[in-house]
Amino acid sequence: MYVTIVHVSVKPDYVEAFKEACRLNHEGSVQESGNMRFDILQSTDEPTKFVLYEAYKTQQDAAAHKETAHYLAWRETVADWMAAPRQGVVFQGLYPVVNV
């Protein structure tokens, strides 16, 4: 499993719009054939802080996600709403075991 955890800091005035844009991206992402999970998390302590947990069967599936219309729309829509550039960290998912 190929997992990316993305940390996003959003400008306060854009939190609700960011959540809606993420919902649309989530709905498209979970329909992708290689997607295992696509979670959007918001900090309870700092509501402008978000984590996107993206799990795909393979690295190729994750790369294909970045070519989808819903991802490209999300990326363009939220670009100016971020207080700082988003930070993604890639992990190898160990469990559950994914048979490709």
Image (tube, rainbow, N blue to C red):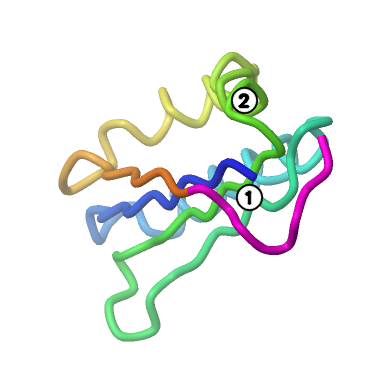
The secondary structure making up most of the magenta span is: loop
Residue 72 shown left or right of residue 69 in the figure = left
Residue at x 41%, y 43% (from the top left corner): 90
Residue 69 shown left or right of residue 33 in the figure = left
Q: Which residue is mark 2?
A: 65
Vertical side of 53 occupied by 100: above or below: above
Question: Per the image, is 40 magenta?
Answer: no
| Crowd rating for badge 1 (residues with CA inside 10 Å; few <14, some 14–19, many 20+) | some
Q: Which residues are magenta?
A: 92-100
Residue placed most toward the observer, 81 or 41: 41
Residue 23 badge: 1
Q: Position of residue 57 (x, y in %)?
A: 71, 38
Quadrant in the rendering for residue 76: top left
Quarter occupied by the N terminus: top right
Vertical side of 32 occupied by 23: above or below: below
Residue placed most toward the observer, 83 or 67: 67
Residue 39 shown left or right of residue 27 in the figure = left
Circle 1: residue type? Arg
Q: Position of residue 40 (x, y in %)?
A: 55, 59
Quadrant in the rendering for residue 44: bottom left
Vertical side of 71 occupied by 23: above or below: below
Circle 2: residue type? His
Residue 48 badge: none
For the residues bearing labels 2 and 1, Cβ distance under 8 angstroms: no
Residue at x 50%, y 31% (from the top left corner): 74
Query: The residue tagged with tag 1: helix, strand or loop?
Result: helix
Q: Position of residue 11 (x, y in %)?
A: 23, 54
Residue placed most toward the observer, 80 or 55: 55
Quadrant in the rendering for residue 68: top right
Query: The residue tagged with tag 2: helix, strand or loop?
Result: helix
